[in-house]
Amino acid sequence: MRAFYPARMLMQQRLRPLGAPRMDSQYPRQQAIRDILTNEEIHSQPELLVRLAQRGIKVTQSSISRDLRQLRVAKVDGRYVLPEALAESVSKQARTSESDGMVDPPVAMESSSAVETLRGLVLEMKAAGPHLLVVNTPVGAAQIVGVSLDGAGWHEIVGTLAGDDTVFIATPSQRAQIRLRRRLEVLMSPRP
């Protein structure tokens, strides 16, 4: 059976090109969130709601929470951070330190602001054999830790696998695992 729509109702509907996203859909809102977090320091969801409202995007706090989760945004050092922004910053610092030649890359990396933002996210570490290090993080922070470590360019890391609160880090040797553990212990210590 066919649905009956009064002509007035049909004329009131906005027409958009086939396949074009709706203005109230997630995609434009998430793009705006990415843009805001890339260009500004946002410390709370209400602050993000205000920035979105200034752009003409009406949204609820629960939608913001869902968007932040889907974008894998983490709250690091009191502000929201996109995973790729943190990884890019870590990777850039690693290339700069290694090309310098006068500074030991591990020392430079631990002092970089990008890796510094990971401080407090590494809660506990356990070796699981000679080539695997298991790192525990606060709930929801494992992705940001994994992406950041992957982007750091550290030779001790072959790759990472991150869940919600655990990161598995593969190392090429037991010696590399020990060195990586020492580097990460710096991130477990409280800020000076």
Image (spheres, rainbow, N blue to C red):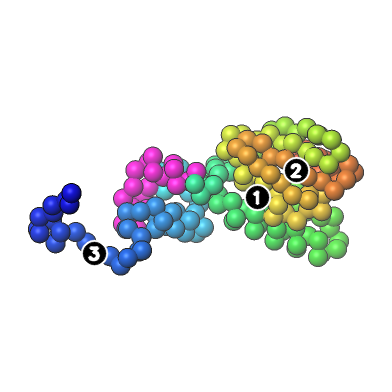
- Circles 2 and 1, Cβ within 8 Å, touching? The answer is no
Residue type at the position of mark 1: Val
Question: Looking at the image, which residue sits at the far right?
Answer: 175
The residues colored magenta run: 49-69
What is the C-alpha distance between the residues marked 1 and 3? 41 Å
Query: Looking at the image, can residue 113 be seen?
Result: no
Q: Residue, x 60% and y 37% (percent of image)? A: 164
Q: Label 2: which residue?
A: 169
Q: Foreground mark, 3 or 2?
A: 3
Q: Label 3: which residue?
A: 15
Task: Examine the structure image and report whether residue 59 is included in the region drawn in magenta.
Answer: yes
Q: Residue, x 84% and y 58% (percent of image)? A: 103
What is the C-alpha distance between the residues marked 3 and 2? 50 Å
| Image position of 97 with respect to 47: above or below | below
Q: Position of residue 71 (x, y in %)?
A: 51, 49
Q: Residue, x 49% and y 46% (percent of image)? A: 70
* Front residue (pair 22, 44): 22
Q: Specify which label sits upstream in the sequence, 2 or 1.
A: 1
Q: Position of residue 73 (x, y in %)?
A: 53, 47
* Front residue (pair 56, 134): 134
